[in-house]
Image (tube, helix red, strand yellow):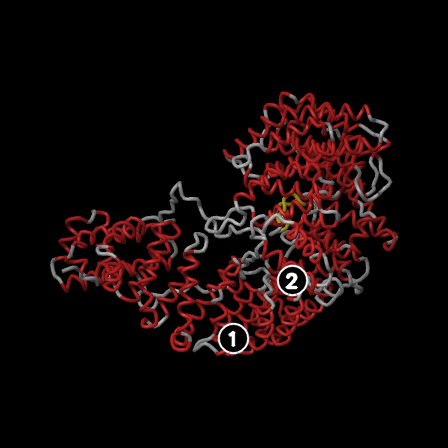
């Protein structure tokens, strides 16, 4: 695409159409942009538009499109074409920083993100002048420009907070500190001076405080991995200024908004974070500054109101106290009983209250409420911080703290008892207090793993939790119901089993509650209870104990999906999946109605898939229905196909990318259930599965390979007779996969199935070409993963076609090739093969080469006979060699560009491990002994003499053991 006005005009028109609400106009425009994004100059056209277009909406749209384009294509993935040509890359890096700095804020943010994506890949090696270019802009004195630089630096450096330590990371941080730490410190001091100069100018203060927030964030990122020498030397400057900013109050910066945090709150929150970082990680160096920070933050907590806008500030301030109080160094600051009482009274209890804003979220924004409360994304809520502070104080002062709070809990419960309908919030706070007091250690998977001995959890459960859940009206006091259900969930390991069994019908009942939070919690609690382990690795709650509730449980779960706001509720769908898994054959009578409801749901969500977890559990539930039913009645597979194929066809025709990998897995499961020939409905689909476009998407590859394997296992003869013209297409797929380091193992899975199941005559003409392709790949890029797969393949070939056929095909490609493969690949590398079945295939294949291949006995290959036997005994007896050569960049199978639908393996569509030599050979060691015996009968005297001359003593000893176990001798 040329950088012409005509192209700019075309691009403008298509970008406009992508904003159209009508999908008939929007989708073709998106497809057009997708089709041209590979063209040279495309990104430069976008940058030109966002700089020169007269329409603001086009500028913004171009900037978002550009950022997403960079996100998808900048990263260079091994084995895949480079999606952005080099000249475009150079031009983008040369122009993007000045363009970003001169753009309005809305566009600046998008370009700043794009710079950080490019920087993630290219900085510092391929973009060495980025830092200098940024630091030089600090001199400009223009805070619009300076904030642009700071924002970009923040998005570039914030990954230092969660990267693993490595030499590469250290040297990058060192480089950044060298160029950035001093200018940043000078900018910090200058900005603070400007704040006092402009103390009465609200507009200037807003800009300056935006800069200070970004500077404080950068301080956190640059200090996170370790305490840099520069910051240690300049701690006085930073900490004194941070402290004075914490205590600063400027009327001009206060906002009237009760919800949204203002600049002052955001800055103070970040400073609390920075102080907590130093108190936790660098306590020795921070010691002199700590007491004044504790005082300032304490005063802040006592004087800050309950409005939502202060939530982040209050929670960060409490988190600071929490991180300080659990460190032995600072224990003395909290020892006094009055201090403890004061903290409990003034900080913890007020911040545990259920406020009007929480009530609003509970009712109107339940999804967000659940995410925070259940999944622990409530890091910045006051309650969570107060809870952490209780836990921190209990580390050294468990007795006194439990004592102080027990008094509060009792008085709160008494208040509630006086007038429940008015005072229910007191009980909510009491439950929360008990929970935070009792839980010492917790995991998502197991609930509470360590509890405070001083709190009687079962007694509290029976007296205060159960009564709420037993009341007939499931819609009364929804917050308390949710609290009660959450209590069961959290303390499921501490409450005795009989109490859990009493709770199950109550939870099933609450699946009907109108409140989204309540019925979601009920579903989640049931799902968690069903996964608890009892003795002998079985589930704690058994299918027999659930028998009386099966019907009402299934009815209420599916009914819950029809409640407003829960049509795609992932917790309910996960509970359905877990219920199927626990109850097994008890659900068979309900399957017809269940599968109808699941297919209707599948059809509905396939129109616009938006909840990945929900979709995943839905497909898992479909797989479980199929498995459980067909295990009891294999013929039922037909009725599932009848129910599902119509929806599957629609998903494939409409190219619903998110669902296609799932559909292939379910189809594999169904096809594997068939015992005889492949039904014609599957054969009709077969040619479509070989279309190259399907194989372009990484997420499709594993399930598609498995589906083709199922076709080969069940219908190789049908393919050979009725679809022989499709065999080249099948091998084309193998050829594409084998060329990729990330997917070559999938190519081998397919090839092994072709060799194992296809009638020999149908693949004869292609065999030599297959081997040539494999050798070309070995020459071009030999990786450990490839060699392991290659070894399994040649041994499987040997088992299927015979050792002589293997030797002949190698030597037909190039004379003496067979010997080279034995010497250079099989003998030195066989130890690397892993996996029971894989090792067994290799053992049986090598045994055939040793005992059923005449050239091994009387040609120049004979010298390799004993080393090969030695390698085979090593495969049996030595530990697996799992070393990987240093120069081999380890290719992660999952490492695919972010925007593609990654492959999600369905646990309940799992495939049984297939053993191609299972029928033939049970114990490969005995098999080796018997085969050697047979060989020695055919040529007496040869085998013992070859063994005695060159097999090492240890291997010989093992071999004697095999011969004894097989009750045979060598002649």
The residue that label 1 is drawn on is 632
Left or right of 768 in this view: 600: right
Using the numbered discs, state the Cα–Cα distance from disc 2 to disc 1 in whole angstroms. Answer: 48 Å
Give percent across and percent down for residue 787.
Answer: 35, 52
Question: Counting other residues with Cα less than 10 Å from the Cα at mark 2, is it few (<14), some (14-19), or many (20 or more)?
Answer: some
Give percent across and percent down for residue 602.
Answer: 63, 68
Q: Which mark is residue 123?
A: none
Give percent across and percent down for residue 809.
Answer: 26, 62
The residue furthest left is 941
Q: Residue at x 53, y 78 (%)?
A: 638
| Image mark count | 2
Q: Nearer the viewer, residue 197 or 161?
A: 197
Tag 1 or tag 2, which sits nearer the N-term? 2
Q: Quadrant of residue 532?
A: bottom right
For residue 321, say whether it is visible.
no
Q: Quadrant of residue 552?
A: bottom right
Q: Nearer the viewer, residue 60 or 751?
A: 60
For residue 77, say whether it is visible.
yes
Left or right of 339 in this view: 741: left
Q: Nearer the viewer, mark 2 or mark 1?
A: 2
Q: Residue at x 66, y 51 (%)?
A: 491
Question: Counting other residues with Cα less than 10 Å from the Cα at mark 1, is it few (<14), some (14-19), or many (20 or more)?
Answer: few
Dot 1 falls on a residue whose secondary structure is: helix
The residue that label 2 is drawn on is 28
Give percent across and percent down for residue 424.
Answer: 83, 52
Q: Nearer the viewer, residue 935 or 132?
A: 132
The C terminus lies in which quarter of the figure?
bottom left
With respect to residue 669, does 883 lie above or below? Answer: above
Dot 2 falls on a residue whose secondary structure is: helix
Left or right of 789 in this view: 300: right
Q: Residue at x 64, y 75 (%)?
A: 593
């Amino acid at each position: 695409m040329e950088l012409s006005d005509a192209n700019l005009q075309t691009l403008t028109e298509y970008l406009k159409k992508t904003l159209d609400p009508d999908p008939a106009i929007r989708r073709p425009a998106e497809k057009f942009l997708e089709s041209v994004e590979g063209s040279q100059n495309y990104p430069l056209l976008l940058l030109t538009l966002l700089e020169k277009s007269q329409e603001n909406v086009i500028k913004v749209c171009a900037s978002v499109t550009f950022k997403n384009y960079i996100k998808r294509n900048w990263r260079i993935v091994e084995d895949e074409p480079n999606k952005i040509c080099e000249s475009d890359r150079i031009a983008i890096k040369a122009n993007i920083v000045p363009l970003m700095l001169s753009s309005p804020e809305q566009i600046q943010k998008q370009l700043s993100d794009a710079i950080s994506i490019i920087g993630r890949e290219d900085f510092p090696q391929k973009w060495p002048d980025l830092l200098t270019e940024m630091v030089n802009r600090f001199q400009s004195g223009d805070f619009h420009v300076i904030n642009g630089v700071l924002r970009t630096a923040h998005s570039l450096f914030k990954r230092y907070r969660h990267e693993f330590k490595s030499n590469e990371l250290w040297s990058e941080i060192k480089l950044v500190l060298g160029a950035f730490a001093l200018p940043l410190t000078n900018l910090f001091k200058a900005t603070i001076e400007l704040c006092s100069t402009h103390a009465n100018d609200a507009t200037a203060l807003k800009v300056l405080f935006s800069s200070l927030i970004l500077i404080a964030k950068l301080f956190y990122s640059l200090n996170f991995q370790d305490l840099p020498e520069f910051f240690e030397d300049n701690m006085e400057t930073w900490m004194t200024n941070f402290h004075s900013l914490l205590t600063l109050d400027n009327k001009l910066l206060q906002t009237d908004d009760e919800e949204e945090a203002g600049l002052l709150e955001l800055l103070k929150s970040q400073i609390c974070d920075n102080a907590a970082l130093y108190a936790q990680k660098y306590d020795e160096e921070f010691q002199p500054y700590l007491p004044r920070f504790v005082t300032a933050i304490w005063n802040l907590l006592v004087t800050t109101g309950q409005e939502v806008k202060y939530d982040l500030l209050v929670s960060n301030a409490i988190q600071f106290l929490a991180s300080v109080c659990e460190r032995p160094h600072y224990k003395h600051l909290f020892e006094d009983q009055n201090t403890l009482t004061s903290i409990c009274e003034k900080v913890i209890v007020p911040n545990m209250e259920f406020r009007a804003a929480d009530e609003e979220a509970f009712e109107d924004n339940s999804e967000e409420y659940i995410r925070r409360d259940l999944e622990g994304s409530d890091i910045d809520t006051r309650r969570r911080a107060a809870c952490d502070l209780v836990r921190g104080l209990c580390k050294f002062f468990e007795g006194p703290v439990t004592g102080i709070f027990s008094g509060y809990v009792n008085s709160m419960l008494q208040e509630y008892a006086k007038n429940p309908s008015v005072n229910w919030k007191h009980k909510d706070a009491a439950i929360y207090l008990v929970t935070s007091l009792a839980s010492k250690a917790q995991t998502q998977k197991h609930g509470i793993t360590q509890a405070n001995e001083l709190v009687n959890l079962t007694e509290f459960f029976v007296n205060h939790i159960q009564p709420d859940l037993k009341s007939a009206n499931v819609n009364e006091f929804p917050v308390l119901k949710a609290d009660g259900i959450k209590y069961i969930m959290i303390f499921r390991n501490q409450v005795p089993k009989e109490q859990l069994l009493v709770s199950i019908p109550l939870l099933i009942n609450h699946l009907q509650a109108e409140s989204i939070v309540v019925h979601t919690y009920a579903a989640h609690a049931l799902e968690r209870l069903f996964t608890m382990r009892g003795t002998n690795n079985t589930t704690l709650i058994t299918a027999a104990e659930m028998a009386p509730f099966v019907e009402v449980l299934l009815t209420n779960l599916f009914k819950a999906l029809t409640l407003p706001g829960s049509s795609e509720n992932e917790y309910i769908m996960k509970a359905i999946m877990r219920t199927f898994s626990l109850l097994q054959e008890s659900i068979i009578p309900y399957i017809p109605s269940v599968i109808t409801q699941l297919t209707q749901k599948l059809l509905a969500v396939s129109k616009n898939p938006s909840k990945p977890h929900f979709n995943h559990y839905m497909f898992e539930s479909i797989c479980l229905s199929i498995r459980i039913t067909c295990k009891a009645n294999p013929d039922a597979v037909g009725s599932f196909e009848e129910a599902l194929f119509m929806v599957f066809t629609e998903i494939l025709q409409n190219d619903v990318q998110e669902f296609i990998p799932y559909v292939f897995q379910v189809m594999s499961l169904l096809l594997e259930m068939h015992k005889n020939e492949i039904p014609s409905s599957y054969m009709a689909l077969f040619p479509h599965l070989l279309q190259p476009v399907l194989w372009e998407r990484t997420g499709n590859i594993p399930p598609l390979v498995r589906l083709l394997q199922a076709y080969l296992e069940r219908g190789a003869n049908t393919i050979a007779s009725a679809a022989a013209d499709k065999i080249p297409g099948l091998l084309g797929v193998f050829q594409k996969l084998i060329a990729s380091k990330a997917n070559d193992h999938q190519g081998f899975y397919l090839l092994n199935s072709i060799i194992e199941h296809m009638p020999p005559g149908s693949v004869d003409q292609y065999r030599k070409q297959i081997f040539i392709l494999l050798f070309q790949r070995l020459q071009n890029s030999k990786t450990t993963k490839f060699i392991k797969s290659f070894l399994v393949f040649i041994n499987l070939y040997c088992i299927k076609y015979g050792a002589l056929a293997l030797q002949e095909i190698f030597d037909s490609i190039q004379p003496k090739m067979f010997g080279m493969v034995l010497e250079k690949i099989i003998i030195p590398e066989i130890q690397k093969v892993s996996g029971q079945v894989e090792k067994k295939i290799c053992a049986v294949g090598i045994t055939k080469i040793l005992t059923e291949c005449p050239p091994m006995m009387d040609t120049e290959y004979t010298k390799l006979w004993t080393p090969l036997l030695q390698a085979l005994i090593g495969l049996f007896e030595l530990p697996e060699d799992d070393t990987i050569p240093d120069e081999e960049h380890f290719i992660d199978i999952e490492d695919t560009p972010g925007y593609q639908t990654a492959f999600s393996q369905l646990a309940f569509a799992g495939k049984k491990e297939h053993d191609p030599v299972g029928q033939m050979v049970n114990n490969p060691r005995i098999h080796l002994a018997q085969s050697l015996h047979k060989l020695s009968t055919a040529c007496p005297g040869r085998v013992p003499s070859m063994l005695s001359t060159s097999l090492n003593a240890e291997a010989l000893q093992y071999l004697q053991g095999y011969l004894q176990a097989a009750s045979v001798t060598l002649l």
